[in-house]
Image (tube, rainbow, N blue to C red):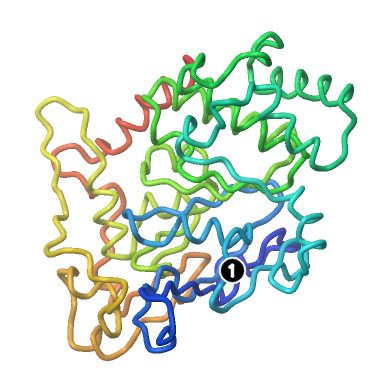
């Protein structure tokens, strides 16, 4: 049972989601090794809630985001949106459902067609769903205002905007057909801190005004703490910890989560960060370790970790996939030596940028 199992009416329900990519195609495809990008994950999302997926590059979080929107087909598993199984829909039914499911991409420039004006880019989804051209112009102007751009920006091209403005255009396009769920695939990672703050504030404001639900994919934990209600930590295609944001930051139970939190920069003169250094490289997703996939880098690994895969077991709304988490969980605010609140200081600096934005 996941921590979200108690939600009264989940908007999104993910169960046993798997995506394997074969390394070779052709006649012998059945015998080809596969990349286990996503290897059996479960979570729920309530209407108007933000769930963050965090982890190192290659852990499967972006693949998960594309599976949720059925931009790629799964190997196995279920994704139910508003009670409807997305993978059971035919092409026509899925096209109708896509109005409620949108995405904001990581690179605000690469995601925009350089040959299309802002009006054409934002208005394209409206045209696909049959809105008349006159009404499209009005709707585009409304959407630009909603994301903090001026109406005259509609006739400009992407290269005429800054990175933050381009991301606002991408957000306007995602909002065009009035979605209920938006997958935010590292939407601020290419922006500097002050612009990150502006975009995050915008996303939070839009969520409150429009009742949007977000799956927020990120690697910056300070940003995650600011925007997300719950966090799922991924490692090699699996969720290893799943909890409310407050609980995860206060008492991370999985060694991998502890390592991620210990990597937060310490902006305190003279303070020494007590880093939890992970030894070795991330194992190949083609041939992941037996048992616990984190065991080859875990300082607490024992024989049981190689023999048995730890289940993602929930206790009090906090789920962790570790055999020995009760023995290794650190006390609250002990991640950084020399300044127990140093991890919070960087967040405060970022929050100051949010307030100034």
Residue depicted at x 26% and y 41%: 264
- Residue 18 spot, x, y in % from top left: 50, 74
Q: Residue furthest top?
A: 152
Residue depicted at x 42% and y 46%: 218
**In the image, 203: left or right of 324?**
right
**In the image, 299: left or right of 340?**
left
Quadrant, the N terminus: bottom right
The quadrant where residue 339 appears: top left
Residue depicted at x 27% and y 37%: 341
- Residue 147 spot, x, y in % from top left: 65, 23
**Residue in the foreground of this view, choosing between 243 and 169:** 169
**In the image, 198: left or right of 301?**
right
Residue 6 position (above or below residue 333): below
Residue depicted at x 30% and y 31%: 346
- Residue 240 spot, x, y in % from top left: 38, 68
The quadrant where residue 15 appears: bottom right
Residue at image mark 1: 73
The quadrant where residue 268 appears: top left
Residue 332 position (above or below residue 140): below
- Residue 334 spot, x, y in % from top left: 23, 49
Instruction: Look at the numbered disc 1 and give the secondary structure of its residue.
Output: loop
Residue 237 position (above or below residue 309): above
Q: Residue furthest front?
A: 27
Q: How many marks?
A: 1
Residue 157 position (above or below residue 97): above
**Residue in the foreground of this view, choosing between 181 and 141:** 141
């Amino acid at each position: 049972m996941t921590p979200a199992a108690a939600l009264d009416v989940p908007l999104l329900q993910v169960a046993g989601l798997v995506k394997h990519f074969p390394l070779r195609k052709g006649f012998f495809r059945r015998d080809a090794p596969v990349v286990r990008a996503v290897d059996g994950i479960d979570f729920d999302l309530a209407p108007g809630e933000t769930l963050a997926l965090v982890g190192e590059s290659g852990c499967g979080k972006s693949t998960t985001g594309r599976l949720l929107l059925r931009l790629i087909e799964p190997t196995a598993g279920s994704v139910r949106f508003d009670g409807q199984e997305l993978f059971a829909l035919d092409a026509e039914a899925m096209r109708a459902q896509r109005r409620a499911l949108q995405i904001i991409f990581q690179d605000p420039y690469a995601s925009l067609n350089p040959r299309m004006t802002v009006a054409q880019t934002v208005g394209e989804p409206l045209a696909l769903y049959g809105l008349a051209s006159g009404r499209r112009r009005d709707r585009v102007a409304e959407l630009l205002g909603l994301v903090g751009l001026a109406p005259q920006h509609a006739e400009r091209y992407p290269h005429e905007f800054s990175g933050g403005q381009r991301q606002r255009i991408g957000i306007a396009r995602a909002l065009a057909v009035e979605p209920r769920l938006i997958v935010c695939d590292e939407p601020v990672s290419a922006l500097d801190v002050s612009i990150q703050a502006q975009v995050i504030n915008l996303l939070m404001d839009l969520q409150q005004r429009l009742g949007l639900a977000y799956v927020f994919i990120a690697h910056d934990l300070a940003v995650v703490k600011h925007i997300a209600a719950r966090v799922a930590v991924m490692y090699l295609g699996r969720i290893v910890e799943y909890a409310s944001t407050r609980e995860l930051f206060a008492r991370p139970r999985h060694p991998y989560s502890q390592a991620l939190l210990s990597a937060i920069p310490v902006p305190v003169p003279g303070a020494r960060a007590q880093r939890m250094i992970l030894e070795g490289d991330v194992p190949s997703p083609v041939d992941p370790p037996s048992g616990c996939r984190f065991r080859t880098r875990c300082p607490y690994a024992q024989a049981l970790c190689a023999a048995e895969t730890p289940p993602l077991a929930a206790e009090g709304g906090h789920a962790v996939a570790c055999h020995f988490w009760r023995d290794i969980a650190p006390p609250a605010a002990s991640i950084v030596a020399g300044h127990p609140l140093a991890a919070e200081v960087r967040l405060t600096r970022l929050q100051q940028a949010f307030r100034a934005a």
